[in-house]
Image (spheres, rainbow, N blue to C red):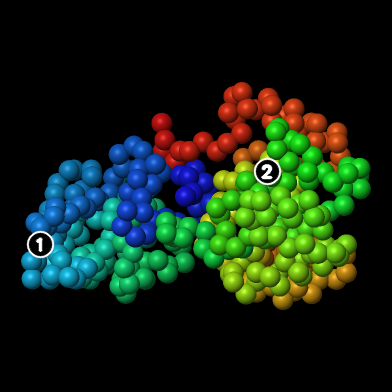
Amino acid sequence: MPTASCIWKSFQTSGKKHLILTGDRGSGKTTLLSALFPCPMPGLTSWAVPKQGVYLKDNFSSKTVQIGRFNPDNTGTENRMLPVLDAFSQTGVSFLRACADVSSDWITIDEIGYLESTCPEYQNALSELMACKHLLMVVRKQKLPFLDSLLAQQDVFVLDLDQPYGNAGCILMASGQGRRFGENKLLTDLAGKPLIQWALDASAGLFAHRLVVTVHKEIQQLCLSQDIPVLLHPFPDRNDMIRLGMGEISSFIDRCAFLPSDQPMILPETIASLLLCAKNLPDFIWRPCSSDTVGSPVIFPSCFFEELKNLPPKKGGNVIVSRYPNLVRTLPVSYSEELKDIDTKEELLAVSQYLGQQSSNRRWRFDDCGPFAP
């Protein structure tokens, strides 16, 4: 599950105005809202009392109104509350309009669901509020026209906690010969584990499909021992590695990340943030950056899959990046060191020393806090 800081970083990078958290019951939507905004925020909060009703509170004034009544006759249905339309059209609308007058740029609403979808006046007031404020909304996961329309708005960043990263794939590139290093660098120890293990760990649990593509039998065995899909091939060039990897997984995914196996300091949170950006702005190529320096992983949407399978000899994905500069978006990393790869033993030693220094002060991680954490 993405952390609050990971989500906030992705949201800010996207340039969108509003943030929606959705997911099935028990997915942690309200918990995540509290992590993003740990201090009390102006807005609305609703809650259900079993077999009684649903209540709506204005967080600023603490005024409360009943917006739903339990209907015992609706047995076996998902929506067992009947809307109290007068409460919505009068008090609920007044709550929303009052939110427009507070000084805070941000308003939280937890949650929006079936009952809200029954009152056009409430929906219109919500639209008016969205025009003048930033909203963080918890939206019930249910197929209803009003809820679908909220999720589909162009200025809304949507996080579905049931599948936060979407149907993304990852190809871990592990076919380098290590000529400058003098041996197979990917199996060289770095802080107690093989160099490639850092990339394997950083990408774990983030992708619907993950594949290591390598020319090294030792790498194949390492991956198989961890039940990580791996493709062993005999070809020397990068375009071959990409073509083979895409041939294995492209039909199962909507976008694909290419992650070098010699980039040990990339943070899982950075990869997760890139994936969240790519899911919400799916027509772009995404990559991390530090100031003017760009790096890996690079995430390509499916519209580039055929070009990736047909790259010029000895060339990689940068051919496509150079071809479509207007379609490239970047996400700033927390530390410039994340973008460093290792080509020499001197670089490996420097990274080892750096990691040793950072482990004592726990700097090498994201701070799990939202925009208004104390």
What is the three-letter code of the residue carrying label 2? Trp
**Residue 31 in the image: x percent, y percent?**
35, 45
The residue beneath circle 2 is 198
Relative image position of residue 177 (x, y in whole percent): 87, 52
* Residue 182 left/right relative to 372: right
What residue lies at 62% left-to-right and 40% top-to-bottom?
A: 334
Residue 59 vs 134, above or below: the answer is above
Residue 224 lies in what quarter of the image? bottom right
Residue that badge 1 annotates: 69
Is the residue under label 2 in contact with that under label 1 (CB below 8 Å)?
Answer: no
Residue shown at 72% from the left, 29% from the top: 354
6 on left or right of 67: right
**Element assignment for label 2:** helix
Residue occupying the point 25% across, 51% down: 44
Q: Residue 27 — which label?
A: none
Q: Is residue 162 visible?
A: yes
Q: Please state the horizontal and vertical placement of residue 337, each as a whole percent of the image.
A: 71, 38
Q: Position of residue 278 (x, y in %)?
A: 57, 61
Whole-angstrom CA distance, mark 1 to mark 2, is 53 Å
